[in-house]
Amino acid sequence: MMRHGMNRRDFLQTGAYSVGTAGLLGAGSSLPFARPVRAASPKHGGTIRIGQSGGAVSDSLDPASFASGPIVTAMLAVCNNLAEIDADGNAVPELAESFNPSADARVWTVPLRSEARFGDGRALTASDVIASFNHHRGADSTSGVKSLLAQITDIRADGPNTVVFELESGNADFPFIAADYHLVVMPANPDGSLNWQSGLGTGGYTLEEHDPGVIVRLKRRDDYWKAGRAWFDTAELLTINDLTARQSALLTGEVDVINSVDRHVLHLLESQPNLSLVEVTGTAHSAIPMFCDTPPFDDVNVRLALKHAIGRTELLEKILLGHGALGNDHPIAPANRFHAADLEQRTYDPDKARYHLKKAGHTRLELTLSAADAAGTGSVDLAVLFREHAAAVGIEIDLLHEPDDGYWTNVWLKKPFVLSYWNGRPTEDLMFSTVYAGDSEWNESHWRNDRFDTLLSAARTELNEDLRREMYREMQILCRDDGGTIVPMFLNYIDARNDKVAHGPVASDRFLDGWKLVERWWSAV
């Protein structure tokens, strides 16, 4: 399935959007669940060595090709964005001095920091920002962020140090778009194209070596414009795609930090006196969509029976070994700013499940659930436990173990009851618009709710934070009580480090402190 040139693999890789919600427009907070390290105060010096998955020999400096891995982490240290995501999940100005929306949030005026300079000493200008955005917008662009930028109708300079963005319609979350990792700012060529081949950026480091799929080496700049960042003298980012090899590299001291630790060996790593976990609850979540236009799922009572017939706590304990958070049948995570933490948590309740089953006219129900390992961490095990839970209330689930190969093209969106997985998105609007809006191409449950769609459009343009919070709270309730998707749990991001490096509060938008650890962390020796 394609959406404006982006397939599901591209979308999952674009998990850069997985953050909180804008703090530029008013006060607010999020719940990143980061664990601050109480170590030595930040200081300059030393080297950080990172073992990271996702590297490939095809890795390029072209930001339109960014997916994940060491090259992305490196270029987020070499370059800056107009905005960045902080540890509280807010989009805060980085190269932008500020973000100034029109009353309808359709036109955004962005003055730039005059002190920002590229690695060759040249000052940042509006033309560099325009080239960096337009690089992803061209007719021939294959960038993973192209569809997200389709809402931009015009980008123009207002003098040498101000950029004006015009959108098709208002979007109060525009600063989060500007924080997307594809949209690092690089220098413009005289003809307005992007000089990404130079590897130059305005960040705290310069690119010293790039051996694709092997290693990236960085060196700190002495003239970095941003105070209190870029502490290490050098950084080495190694591609170690094999999980066992990556963990071994940390244990033997070959690297100082690794991403994506196997949950089954967490106790072994935690038992090492010189190692610590770096764990946050992000926006990634398991999902079980049901086609709301297909019997028996077209009856909301069947949907509610199934939502009450799944043991979320047992799934969290047995599948994620406790390293996650309970889901409440909507996709807005504790890490999202407008997460409705006050909603009653849905639990395994056989009596309520039987009540809704009976209300739908059933005493027993037989269903087929498609499952595959491709649908996320422990997905088949999740399906097996769900079958056991549901059987106790008279719902017999026949598990159809689908091939991993082709699952997202042959099963997902094709069959009425399947397992799914989402990395989540930085804002409620992006997550809801992509998967839950009635007209979304990726509306995996075929759910349509007029009130929900009305609120979705209204919240997108609303600049009053309190009003937006109420709108998104109601939308979460609608998903939970009427929607066609079971969201049983959210998955933690788990990295590990040795005691040679230290950090403060950690961002929850993805692994490795939002892939910004090279700039934010420091040497502890």
Image (cartoon, rainbow, N blue to C red):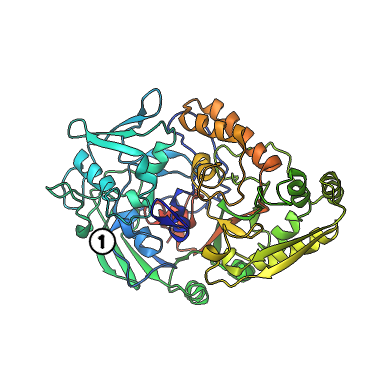
The secondary element bearing badge 1 is classed as strand
Task: Please identify the quarter of the rendering in which residue 238 is found.
Answer: bottom left
Side of 266 relative to 115 (left or right) = right
Q: Position of residue 149 (x, y in %)?
A: 35, 44
Please state the total of marks drawn on the protein image: 1
* Residue 132 in view in this figure: yes
Front-most of 236 and 373? 373
Task: Please identify the quarter of the rendering in which residue 468 is found.
Answer: top right
Residue lying at the far left of the rendered structure: 190
Q: Position of residue 42 (x, y in %)?
A: 41, 51
Front-most of 515 and 191? 191
Front-most of 496 and 145? 145
Q: Which residue is mark 1?
A: 207
Side of 59 relative to 351 (left or right) = left
Front-most of 172 and 74? 172
Q: Position of residue 314 (x, y in %)?
A: 75, 59
Quarter of the image with the C terminus is bottom left
Q: Tell me if residue 2 comes above or below residue 85 in the rendering.
A: below
In the image, what residue type sits under mark 1?
Leu
Q: Position of residue 317 (x, y in %)?
A: 72, 60
Residue at x-position 74% and y-position 50%: 307
* Residue 376 in view in this figure: no
Residue lying at the far top of the rendered structure: 103
Residue at x-position 27% and y-position 55%: 140
Q: Tell me if residue 149 comes above or below residue 246 in the rendering.
A: above
Side of 421 relative to 523 (left or right) = right
Q: Could you classify mark 1 by the number of other residues whose Cα lies within 10 Å: few (under 14), some (14-19), or many (20 or more)?
A: many
Residue at x-position 39% and y-position 46%: 148
